[in-house]
Structures are given as structure tokens and as C-alpha cells.
Amino acid sequence: MLARLDHRLLFAMRTRFHDKRVELGAKMLGLLGEFGAVWIAIALALASADPDRRSPWLRTAALAPLAMGLNYAVKRIVHRPRPRLEGLPPLGRAPSSLSFPSGHTTASFACALAMTRVDARAAPLFVLASLIALGRPYLGMHYPSDVLGGALLGTAFGLVVPLT
């Protein structure tokens, strides 16, 4: 029953509200989220702009690749294949054939939360994290449950990593 709901949600996200500009935006966010690159860039910029908290900001930069490593370990355990929708190929590429959890989402939520722990004014970064996450099923790269799993894993990781 949950698998059917997951498939139906994926189909809806992959077929509704598709416009070339929105697809391009989702693809661009996907590229920015590759290997947590956007989060590393943001953390380095914040470390440069805030010398009093340079060390915690630099730790958040290191969090992105660490979150991707954790994510890949979980992917290897779960071993869920990426979704395939008949007649609707994915609109992006993936570094592996494994789907659960979404690495883009794991790194995004881990970093957005860790950055918010460093400075509460970073909370709007959750908008970016959410847009990156929503783009994954929109492009047909992940099931919605992959994104939910990535958000939960990333949130937990962002909470437990020491920043000081």
C-alpha cells in the first residue's frame, strides 16, 4: 500500500506542473546539490564573512561530503533501485543506480540544520534544501519516500555533528 502511494505521488510529481523553465530550475538545483557542492560554497562564504565563527562554518562545509558518505552507506544497505516510470524517463543523471535515501536531500538538510545551529539567521536555507529535495522526484530521480528518508537522515546528522 505504501509502495503504491509512493509510486502514485512520484507519477503525479513527474507529470504535473511541468514547464521547461521549471524543469530547467530543478535541473540546476540538482547540479548545485551534486555532492553537496552548494552547501560547501555557502559554508565557505559564511566562514569568510564571519571570522568570529569561522571554525563552526568550516565544520558545516565538511558536513556535506560526510553526509554524502553516510547516505551512500545507507543506500548500500537498503539497495533500492531508482524509479522507472513507463514512458517517462528521468530528466537528470545519477551517480549510482541506488535510490534510497536521496543524497541531495540528506546533504541539504544536514547542512541547512547545521548552519542554522551556527546562526539562526541561516534558517531560510531550509527553503533551498526543500527545493533541492522536491526537485528529485519532480525530475523522476527518486521516489518521494527517498526524499523523506533523506530529510530525516540529514536532519538527524545535522543535529548530532559537533560544531564547536
Image (cartoon, rainbow, N blue to C red):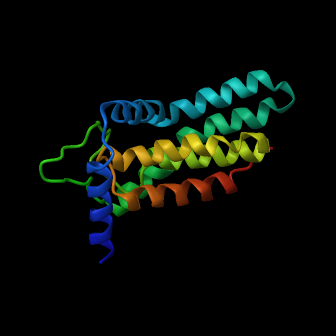
x, y percent for residue 43: 67, 31
Judge left or right: residue 143 versus residue 43.
left
Image quarter hosting the C terminus:
top right
Residue positioned 28% across, 64% down in the render: 8
Picture quadrant where residue 62 is located = top right
Looking at the image, which residue is at 18% across and 44% down? 89
Q: Residue 6's x, y, as percent?
A: 32, 65
Residue 119, quarter of the rendered image? top right
Residue drawn at x 58%, y 34% as measured from the top left: 39
Residue 59's quadrant in the figure? top right
Quadrant containing the N terminus in the rendered view = bottom left
The mark tally for this picture is 0
Which residue reaches farthest top?
48
Q: Is residue 93 above or below residue 3?
A: above
Which of these two is toward me, 95 or 42? Answer: 42
Residue 146 in the image: above or below residue 136: below
The x and y percentages for residue 110 are 60, 48
Locate residue 75, reporting x and y percent.
Answer: 38, 55
Between 75 and 113, the one nearer to me in the picture: 113
Q: Is residue 4 above or below residue 9?
A: below
Which of the two residues, 12 or 113, is positioned nearer the viewer here?
12
